[in-house]
């Protein structure tokens, strides 16, 4: 039961090595023909032109020309590692998923951590949330938990997601990061404030991927063997402890070692010091949800730990580096929709949209058969269905068996009504419409950020205000004013501290007027 039992690294299954006449491994073309010379193209005469006879020359260059695939549209810069999950506490009263069936049970895991808005070569120490994506290879198929290092998010509706990301990526004209777009969007969308404060607090730059917690962030549903359901929130608490990098050091590291977190993870695993996390859940009875003091499915909010204390489930341990970055990390595709029986979605509207977004993105990024890639295949749960064909289909594609259902033949896959993927539950009377979330008021955008601000030490408050001021100073005055208004509504001392750091005049003299 160690790391990744049964989960392949790339290149493990290539058959016996072919040897050349010297007894050394034979270099072959992509088709497998022997290569006799890799230094000289086939030419006409000693200084003549090359010929089309040189398949190796063209093939080698043509393949090189196609090495790049689209990077992830968000979360492009990342690092991954293999490991395992071990159950330490019995939670079978809450969840029937096989992964939790008994204390001591181990399940192989692949994890990927990343920044969000930078490209695949971006600095690891950017001030940004961090992705915290886990793929559990279970006997009931893969369970992907595609979380972040923050328990909340910028928006409570995925309809705003492309705008949020546009505003944080590059300006369409200058191709530079744009504090105007960044703060223009955020100051118009105050539901972002909870996440903004976390991102600009010292936790906005974790000291590598080992020193941060991971959160499922959304509310999920756990269902037990009797079909009883609970709402749950997932927490992965770093056993290494929280450690952050100061703003100044982060900026310095971005220059000295843009791969700081990638290196930290790789080296520590290499040295036998792989990181671990303790998996805990908050559990809310379904009956509590309608009367809880705010919408428990609102992704901009955390559940009070007093109301719903953390309950331990198990340990996540990472102990094996990928052998090939592209095959295992770049080609990994995680999706919140990959859930196993006993783990289900909640009505959180961001989660619901994400259930579609990830496999859709993977079909573009990796192709229609991305789930056939070794890193995405579950070695313990054979895939059996009637989907066929598509680009780069490299299994046996169902062989000669019927490719439709229903059919009249034996020994072919049949649905099992005893294994429902969604347990029916009552929610909100069932009128489907575009509408604001239940029990939401404007005040909601400020209450928890205010509590977070007042919970911070004086020192953390100073740093947070300084980090914000350092960033927002690049925005136009009317945008700064608007965001200061958001801060003021949260807590006058927050606005005041940022203003002090900015050293700006209270009254804006900016010539730009706001386009309403
Ligand atoms: C990556 C969409 C919110 C965590 C991605 C990708 C897309 C996406 C399209 C790229 C996937 C790929 O190419 O494989 C969305 C949408 C959201 C949203 C539409 C709606 C607001 C969130 C939230 C979290 C999150 C709230 C965390 C709680 C991640 C992570 C990755 C990712 C960790 C990288 C996964 C990996 O390592 O491959 N997202 N996202 N996203 N997202 Fe989201």
Image (tube, rainbow, N blue to C red):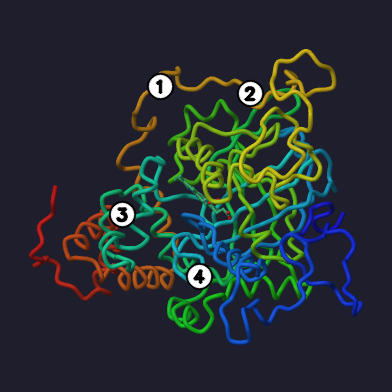
Question: What is the spatial separation of the Cα atoms under label 4 and label 2, in whole angstroms?
Answer: 43 Å
**177 versus 225 height, above or below:** below
The answer to whether the residue labelled 3 contacts the one labelled 4, judged by CB atoms less than 8 Å apart, is no
Tell me if the residue at label 4 has its CB under 8 Å from ligand 1.
no
**466 versus 388 height, above or below:** below
Number of numbered discs: 4
The disc, 3 or 4, on the residue closer to the chain's N-terminal end is 4
Q: Nearer the viewer, mark 3 or mark 4?
A: 4
Question: What is the spatial separation of the Cα atoms under label 3 and label 4, in whole angstroms?
Answer: 26 Å
Q: Residue 31: where, in percent of width, then height?
A: 74, 59
Q: Residue 503: where, in percent of width, then height?
A: 21, 76
Crowding near the residue tagged with mark 1, few <14, some 14–19, many ≥20 C-alpha atoms within 10 Å: few
Tell which of 73 and 489 is nearer to you: 73
Residue topped by disc 2: 423
Residue topped by disc 1: 432
Q: Residue 438: where, in percent of width, then height?
A: 39, 30
Question: What is the spatial separation of the Cα atoms under label 1 and label 3, in whole angstroms?
Answer: 28 Å
């Amino acid at each position: 039961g160690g790391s990744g039992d049964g989960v392949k690294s790339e290149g493990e299954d290539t058959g016996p090595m072919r040897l050349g006449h010297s007894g050394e491994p034979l270099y072959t073309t992509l088709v497998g023909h022997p290569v006799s010379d890799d230094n000289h193209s086939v030419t006409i005469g000693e200084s003549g032109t090359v010929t089309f006879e040189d398949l190796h020359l063209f093939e080698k260059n043509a393949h090189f020309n196609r090495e790049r695939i689209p990077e992830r549209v968000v979360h492009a810069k990342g690092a991954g590692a293999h490991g395992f999950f071990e159950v330490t506490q019995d939670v079978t009263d809450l969840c029937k998923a096989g992964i939790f069936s008994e204390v001591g049970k181990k399940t192989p895991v692949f994890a990927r951590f990343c920044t969000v808005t930078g490209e695949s070569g971006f600095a690891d120490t950017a001030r940004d949330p961090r992705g915290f994506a886990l793929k559990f290879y279970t006997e009931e198929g893969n369970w992907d938990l595609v979380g972040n290092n923050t328990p909340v998010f910028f928006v409570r509706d995925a309809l705003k997601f492309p705008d949020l990301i546009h505003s944080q990526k590059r300006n369409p004209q200058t191709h530079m990061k744009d504090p105007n777009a960044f703060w223009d969007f955020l100051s118009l969308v105050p539901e972002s404030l909870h996440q903004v404060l976390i991102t600009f607090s010292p936790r906005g730059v974790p000291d590598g991927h080992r020193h941060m917690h991971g959160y499922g962030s959304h509310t999920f549903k756990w269902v037990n063997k009797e079909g009883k359901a609970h709402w749950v929130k997932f927490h992965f608490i770093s056993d290494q402890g929280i450690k952050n990098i100061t703003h100044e050091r982060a900026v310095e590291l971005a220059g000295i070692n843009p791969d700081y977190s990638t290196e930290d993870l790789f080296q520590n695993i290499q040295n036998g010091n792989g990181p671990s996390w303790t998996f805990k859940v908050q559990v809310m009875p379904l009956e509590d949800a309608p009367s809880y003091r705010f919408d428990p499915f609102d992704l901009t909010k955390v559940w009070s730990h007093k109301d719903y204390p953390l309950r331990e489930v198990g340990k996540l341990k990472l102990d094996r580096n990928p052998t090939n970055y592209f095959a295992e990390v770049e080609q990994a595709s995680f999706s919140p929709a990959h859930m196993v029986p006993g783990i289900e979605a909640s009505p959180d509207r961001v989660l619901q949209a994400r259930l579609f977004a990830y496999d859709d993105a993977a079909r573009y990024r990796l192709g229609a058969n991305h789930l056939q890639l070794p890193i995405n295949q579950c070695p313990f749960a054979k895939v059996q269905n009637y989907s066929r064909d598509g680009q780069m289909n490299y299994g046996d594609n169902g062989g000669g068996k019927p490719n439709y259902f229903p059919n009249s033949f034996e020994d072919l896959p049949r649905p099992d009504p005893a294994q429902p993927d969604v347990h029916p539950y009552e929610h909100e009377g069932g009128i489907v419409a575009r509408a604001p979330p239940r029990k939401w008021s404007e005040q909601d955008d400020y209450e928890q950020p205010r509590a977070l601000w007042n919970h911070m030490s004086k020192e953390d408050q100073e740093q947070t205000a300084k980090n914000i001021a350092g960033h927002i100073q690049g925005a136009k005055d009317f945008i700064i004013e608007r965001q200061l208004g958001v801060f003021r509504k949260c807590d006058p001392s927050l606005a005041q501290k940022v203003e002090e750091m900015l050293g700006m005049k209270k009254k804006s003299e900016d010539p730009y007027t706001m386009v309403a």
